[in-house]
Amino acid sequence: MSPSRWSVTCAALLALAPGCSESPGDSGAELPLYPVVDQRGIVTYVTTDPRPAEVEKARQLELRQQQYEEARQRQKEQADEDLARWRKHQADEIDRTIQRLREQQEERTTQARSRPQPRWQGNSQFLRSGEAESLRWQRNSQDLDRALRRLHQGQQDYGVRPRDPVFLERDSSLLPR
């Protein structure tokens, strides 16, 4: 056979062989091919899965378990990152509150030093110092209450429930004004 006839014959066989051309009843869906190695080491492909169904189910179960573990690990890492951001935010808020309280204390100290002292000092000075001390404690307590409320609000913003919300239940009407 001449080479030109040989190629025409091969082309005709390929066109007529099943699976090589679409017939009117063919939906166009491709069948899955599974590799099979015979005793001589030759790889061929078949359309039916040569593995037992139990092995395939075990493989799929293992794959799902691995995907679940990876998703759980990603969630844990995300939660750790969120916690770290929240802690940094809280530390920054505490630092700002401490700095503000220090500035207020320095301001009060400067104002107290700049006030002229009366020429007479007796028991009234002692009483005024107690009154000033009481006012200072009251202001500090109010500042602390405000800082704790902001802390509680920050915890709520990040979805963390405070462990002891007693400070919010305190009746502020009992405090002296």
Image (cartoon, grey):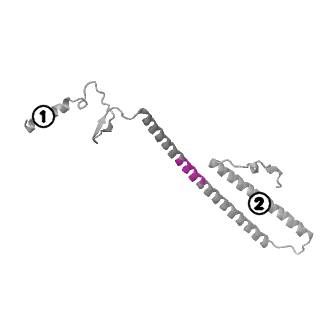
Residue at the extreme left: 2
Across and down, in percent, residue 78 comes to 55, 50
- Element assignment for label 1: helix
Q: Is residue 123 left or right of residue 23?
A: right
Q: Which sits in the foreground, 169 or 77? A: 77
128 to the left or right of 148? right
Of pointers 1 and 2, the one earlier in the residue sequence: 1
159 left or right of 67 in image: right
Q: Is residue 123 above or below residue 28?
A: below
Task: Give the main secondary structure, helix, strand or loop, of the magenta stretch.
Answer: helix
Residue drawn at point x = 87 percent, y = 66 percent: 128
Quarter of the image with the N terminus is top left
What amino acid type should be assigned to the residue bearing mark 1? Answer: Val
What is the C-alpha distance between the residues marked 1 and 2? 100 Å
Quarter of the figure with residue 17: top left
Where 133 falls versus 145 (above or below)?
below
- Span highlighted in magenta in the image: 73-83
- Residue identifier under label 1: 8
List the residue tagged with mark 2.
Answer: 140
Most foreground residue, 16 or 166: 16
Residue 74 vertical placement versus 33 (above, below): below
Whole-percent x and y of residue 119?
A: 88, 75
Counting from the top left corner in percent of width and height, residue 32 is at 34, 34
User: Is-magenta flag for residue 6?
Assistant: no
Image quarter where the C terminus lies is bottom right
Q: Amino acid at mark 2?
A: Asn
